[in-house]
Amino acid sequence: MTEIETPEAPATRSGFVALIGAPNAGKSTLVNQLVGAKVSIVTHKVQTTRAIVRGIATHDNAQIVFVDTPGIFKPKRRLDTAMVTTAWGGAKDADVVALLIDAERGIKGDANAILDRLKDVRQPMLLVLNKVDRVKPETLLALAATANERVPFERTFMVSALTGSGCKDLLDYLAETLPLGPWYYPEDQISDLPMRQLAAEITREKLYLRLHQELPYSSHIETEKWEEKKDGSVRIEQVIYVERDSQKKIVLGHKGETIRAIGQAARMEIAEILEQKVHLFLFVKVRENWGDDPERYREMGLEFPH
């Protein structure tokens, strides 16, 4: 049933917007900026968004559900293939597809390949040029013109995901153009990622921020216990899985210093999001070849590629 707009109650709009782009184009930072809260992990390491994280923004009378897909790149391993498949699946199911391009890097490599594949996408598409504060205006205009010659974008937006510049224009446009209809989520919800998974994502971010040079990409975190205490606090136990003993030593650090620092940073942020006291306990376990275990993929919300 279509909602009728009356003077007293403007009709609501809602829809899913898939953000796609090359790894490190700034998708997670942009989702966090648009939602106004931390829902997606942001690190220096490429391909940190593994499963689709939905951030939910309420703007005017619209509920805009952002699907932050994994970065689209040339897959080398099984995990990579699962992530790329998930990313294109997220784009296929959305009402609007927004391509984010790092204006500093321009159209090359992965971004170039994505533009080629967008020709097959049926939904309305938007071009979002990010990091515009670091690029000359004439470079930006040339970049926008080149991309629009290759793909029929409805609109082009120039933003800085880091400072928020240009983000309101994007939200205004989406709030006016998404389909009429009821909202999908309660008004105060910012993500549909279960809290246990979000807590694991936060710890994973802290792990990468601390060890992004030394730690290989194939580490995985699971929240194994979540216990609400009588005093209103919550006890959380998480396991950091790595593939080798040498990696375990790196995560623990000298006399456990590294894991303590990671735990402290994660605990503070989880407590802020939950708005309650958090007791966080981290354990490190070696699980060889977890990258070939279908069960791990299901836990991450990815499809296991056969």
Image: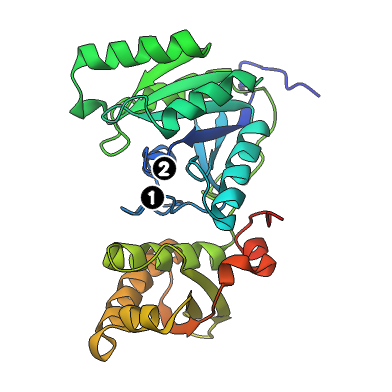
Considering the numbered disc 2 on the image, is that residue within a helix, a strand or a loop?
loop
Callout 1 amino acid: Val
Real-space CA distance between mark 2 and mark 1, rounded to the nearest whole angstrom: 5 Å
User: In x, y percent, where is residue 232?
Assistant: 49, 79
Q: Is residue 163 left or right of residue 194?
A: left
How many neighbours does mark 2 have within 10 angstroms: few (below 14), some (14-19), or many (20 or more)? many
**Image quarter in which the C terminus is found:** bottom right
Considering the numbered disc 1 on the image, is that residue within a helix, a strand or a loop?
loop
According to the picture, the residue beneath numbered tag 2 turns out to be 23
Residues at discs 2 and 1 in contact (Cβ within 8 Å): yes
Q: Would residue 232 be seen by someone viewing this image from the given angle?
A: no
Q: In the drawing, what numbered circle is on residue 46?
A: 1
User: In x, y percent, where is residue 84?
Assistant: 57, 44
**5 up-or-down from 103: above or below:** above
Residue name at image x 56 percent, y 34 percent = 18
- How many numbered badges does the structure rendering display? 2
Nearest the eye: 259 or 61: 259
**71 up-or-down from 7: above or below:** below
Residue name at image x 53 percent, y 22 percent = 116
**Image quarter in which the N terminus is found:** top right
Nearest the eye: 204 or 115: 115
Nearest the eye: 155 or 7: 155
Q: Would residue 16 be seen by someone viewing this image from the given angle?
A: yes
User: In x, y percent, where is residue 93?
Assistant: 68, 34
Callout 2 amino acid: Pro
